[in-house]
Image (cartoon, coloured by chain):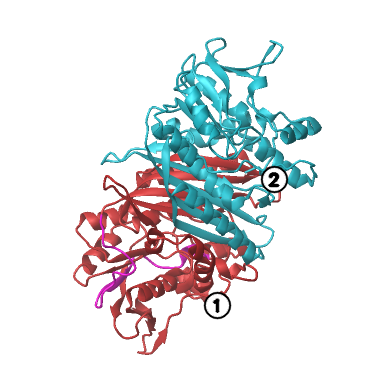
Chain colours: A cyan, B red
Amino acid sequence: MRGEITLAHGNGGEENRSLISGIFFKHLKNEILQKAEDAAVVPFEKGENIAFTTDSFTVTPLFFAGGDIGKLSICGTCNDLAMMGARPRYLSLAVMVEEGFSARELEKIVRSMKKELAKNGASVVCGDTKVMPKGTIDGVLINTSGIGETLIGGIGASKLREDDLIVVSRDIGAHGAAIFTAREGIELESSLESDCTSLWPAVEALLDAGIEPHAMRDATRGGVAAVVNEWAVSSGVCIELEESKIPISQSVRGICEMLGFEAVALANEGTFLLALSAEDAPKAVEILRSFEGNGSASVIGRVTGEYEGRALLLSEWGTKRFLESPSGELLPRIC
Amino acid sequence: MRGEITLAHGNGGEENRSLISGIFFKHLKNEILQKAEDAAVVPFEKGENIAFTTDSFTVTPLFFAGGDIGKLSICGTCNDLAMMGARPRYLSLAVMVEEGFSARELEKIVRSMKKELAKNGASVVCGDTKVMPKGTIDGVLINTSGIGETLIGGIGASKLREDDLIVVSRDIGAHGAAIFTAREGIELESSLESDCTSLWPAVEALLDAGIEPHAMRDATRGGVAAVVNEWAVSSGVCIELEESKIPISQSVRGICEMLGFEAVALANEGTFLLALSAEDAPKAVEILRSFEGNGSASVIGRVTGEYEGRALLLSEWGTKRFLESPSGELLPRIC
């Protein structure tokens, strides 16, 4: 690859994929990495089914409505495991702190981690701390990696089948909108909080009820649009979403109208999509709705054979348009 | 904890320990984390013995004599696994890149990773890429976490026994001295290269030969001084090092004299200490010396009961002094 790395290379969409394939996959590819989605499933001799994932957290501001970088760093990694049907078990925690950062604020961040770890039944088992000279990083950057125990197999982006239904666990775009308003100092009449939350409890309830998801994915960078496009390509299917069925809160709708964002491209940190059989869908929606914040869980679309590898958005008036994977500079440091 | 985080909190020595215990351990402690050393050994139901570790790499300059941040990021994490007697297997790779960074340089870094992974027989199986707006980080920061398979048990900082011998795998301080000279633009007559290397091949050879190390530790931040102090405290023993037996190259000695550093406190990235029985030591030294760069592997000290929890440095003239764990601001961004 030539040229310079741009912000667009970190958008979770098209350019991000080109950076990954043009530099990282090119030199480091192997069978496990190629199959890895939110987490990689790694084989061990004694047959343990282990999922492994990593994520860096660079969000700014560090504290926002609905969470902080500490909560986010635990949710993000545990959610990646949960999306592979894996119970979060062991986390590593690597923190980079800028010289001069307040010890009290750092402790507040770590307290948020503790609370969120408990919700996942997971523990931090190893760590690393680096202090960076003033001005060489901005505040605090965190990396967590996680090991989980996969409870189900056969789940993944390539497992969608025609006639599957697409379910979303709640209203979308809250994290992206909350970070944006916090960063720009926009005052809203309504309360707008990030959806940042741990998804394992809901996933566990779904699995316990015998639901068999074909794919699950939390719609982080690149939002719902990135997820459905990746699924459509990986499974060679068409995903058709009904615009009117996608739950979007009034606050997020307002932010989108004001600033020209599309809610389907906004980042989420506690909202996931499921692809599953029409038979399993109603039960899944019912279970999801029993969890706090998930009252608007809904079936929002279905898998068809119309345009292979593409996603469609169907309007209320019967028109259709392609829903593209986000490209260009999205919000940097959203997670 | 109160006040501000200072560079000294990242020194791998005393203040680093106080930050970890005052903030991270305080809120996140659990049995596995408490026992974790270079890596944590995590239990799984089917009895797989898995070691897990994480490290962030922040070195500046990114390219230095003997390595670059890519090589370092693989060596660092694989070495942490090797030191627990674990074969490196699966790595995660999280890269943060500053907007505007050269794609070619990034590719060069990734190529170094590939080369080093092969030496360890390990693979990168999951990753994350974040692009940071210009000025919010300096160049490239990398985190790798690693999963290994532990081949031996009963190894650790608390397993040293009286009359054990202390072996060092090669001459010390090369990484710290190389980074310092690169950073300060010091020109040396002699060639000085970082010791940055993968230790698993040497460790594997030791284990294959039936050597039973009681403890192994690569002497990274805080150097040899930090390792022997930690071992002395954890095992409740005294470690006595003979100054004249500690191998130090002419170049490192020169840098230390010029700048007032102590070689025993300089960071290494491919140099480790072993504590083992007097019976195993000669064979271990012989095996170590057969590896490139390890021609100066030597017995440098022994474990006694003289001062519990302390390390001593014995001079050639028969004088003794306590060797303290490094404190204060050491070189930031050394690894």
Residue type, label 1: Gly
Is B234 in the magenta?
Answer: no
* Tag of residue B260: 1
The magenta stretch is B152-177
Rate crowding at label 1 as few (under 14), some (14 to 19) or many (20 or more) other CA atoms within 10 Å: few
Q: CA distance from mark 1 to mark 2?
A: 38 Å
Q: Who is closer to the viewer here, A323 or B233? A: A323
Which of discs 1 and 2 lies nearer the camera? The answer is 2
Q: Who is closer to the viewer here, A234 or A227? A: A227
Chain letter for mark 1: B
> Which residue is at a point 55% across and 49% down the rendered structure image?
A73
Q: Who is closer to the viewer here, B221 or A213? A: A213
In the rendering, at what x and y percent does residue B328 appear?
56, 75
- Where is the C terminus of chain A found, in terms of image quarters? top right
- Where is the N terminus of chain A found, in terms of image quarters? top right
Q: Which residue is mark 2?
A: B133
